[in-house]
Amino acid sequence: MSDCDGSASTSSSSSRRFSLADIQSATENFADDLVIGRGGFGKVYKGSITDGERMTVAVKRLNPRSRQGAREFRTEIEMLSRFRYRYLVSLIGYCEEPDEMILVYEYMPRGNFADHLHRSGKNYSAPLPWLRRLRICTDAARGLDYLHTGTSIQPDRAIHRDVKSSNILLDDNWDAKISDFGLSRLGPEDRTYSHVSTDVKGTRGYLDPDYNLTGRLTRKSDAYAFGVVLLEALCGRPALDLRCVDEEQWGLAGWAQYCIREGTVDAIIDPSVREEIKKDCLMEFVQIADECLHNFPRKRPTMAEVVVRLEFALAMQEGKDSSIVVKPAKMPLTLQEGEDSSDVVKPAKMTFTRNMRRFFLGTTSAAALTFSLRRHTSVSAGSPPRRRPSPHPSGDLGLSPLPHPSLLSPRQARHR
Ligand SMILES: Nc1ncnc2c1ncn2[C@@H]1O[C@H](COP(=O)(O)OP(=O)(O)OP(=O)(O)O)[C@@H](O)[C@H]1O
């Protein structure tokens, strides 16, 4: 397995190397009024370069006092030169001189998802509608799925290791891309190397508890962090909020999981979208988030599964004919970390049977269910679809034809 933590040579052939003079000219010599963000690496500036034609870019300059440094700089170049995809931010080039390490990216005019959810920063203007949040989450999941599984043309796989809402950037059309690959790790490529042992890195509030405890990094650590992002999108609350009076509510993941178990999710949904969310969509969305946060990494869904299920939730929200969208675009054919063959459920079939059964039980007749099952799966109309054990201790969160607990009023929930 190649190691991207600084020891690997930089494969930067597809990125342009800029001189410091180029960057100074692009950013008006790092003018303060061009600063568009700040992170652990340093300041980010809006700039303008000429590459045939004039182009707006984002310029990230390493702060010499930063705790991050050469290692993250090389990893970012290595990863973004290798992984190019519409749901990952593009690296245009870099500048490396004795006292400077600078990265140049495509410019994402609407900034990061976190600012829009938490109503901060210059790019925030109004609360994001639910459908937009759902589309952003789906785009981000596609980016992570690509990173985790690669393609036949680009077979490398990687773990992001710092999935969070401030690392999801938005373009003019609100299309989302994953950014910030400084902590990413290449691999694991197959089952023999199903995890990578590393120092624990990431961001508080998003850190997979299993990884935190054992140092075993798997793709499912990204799935965990992505589950937290889903909750942020639903609740409009940061992953970690130390301003909450009740300390038990500081960590969104723990608090939301408690509310899911108690049947009081309704109370923590962002009031600005509460009325917009369709019931079926909410049930699916909450269940995906809950499964991503499962204590046992192997019980969390792969990002490929998450993509399909978010597409399904999206279709339910948009009121589209769900039979058109359940078919997955891409499914991993190989085992992933910690999985044995009994763990691998053919995602297309599983997603279909779980979701469609719920969908049809909720909305249409048994005849429609039978017809659709015959059309789309090998499950015979007479036999009930096979169920996976629910990771939910309180039982059947999603498959029950009864309303999802989160949809019940506290009074109804008490009497259930
Ligand atoms: N390509 C870009 N286009 C537009 N804005 C960007 C771009 N890259 C970064 N930014 C802005 O700069 C901010 C800081 O980015 P950066 O990746 O350095 O830090 P971060 O991910 O927010 O924090 P951390 O270093 O803790 O991971 C982002 O949140 C975003 O608002």
Image: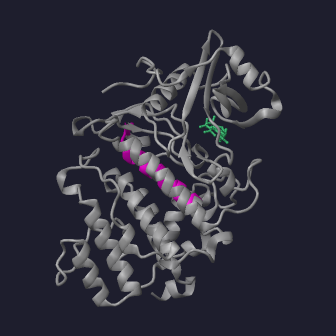
Main SS class of the magenta portion in the image: helix
Residue at the farthest top position: 98
- At horizontal 57% and vertical 25% (from top left) the residue drawn is 93
Residue 396, percent across and down?
35, 75
- At horizontal 62% and vertical 11% (from top left) the residue drawn is 97
Return the residue nearer the eye: 80 or 114: 80
* Quadrant for the C terminus in the image: bottom left
Q: Is residue 49 magenta?
A: no
Chain part drawn in magenta: 215-232
Q: Is residue 216 magenta?
A: yes
Q: Is residue 85 above or below residue 236?
A: above
Residue 341, percent across and down?
18, 52
Q: Quadrant of ligand 1?
A: top right
* Quadrant for the N terminus in the image: top left
Q: Quadrant of residue 291?
A: bottom left
Residue 209 in view in this figure? no
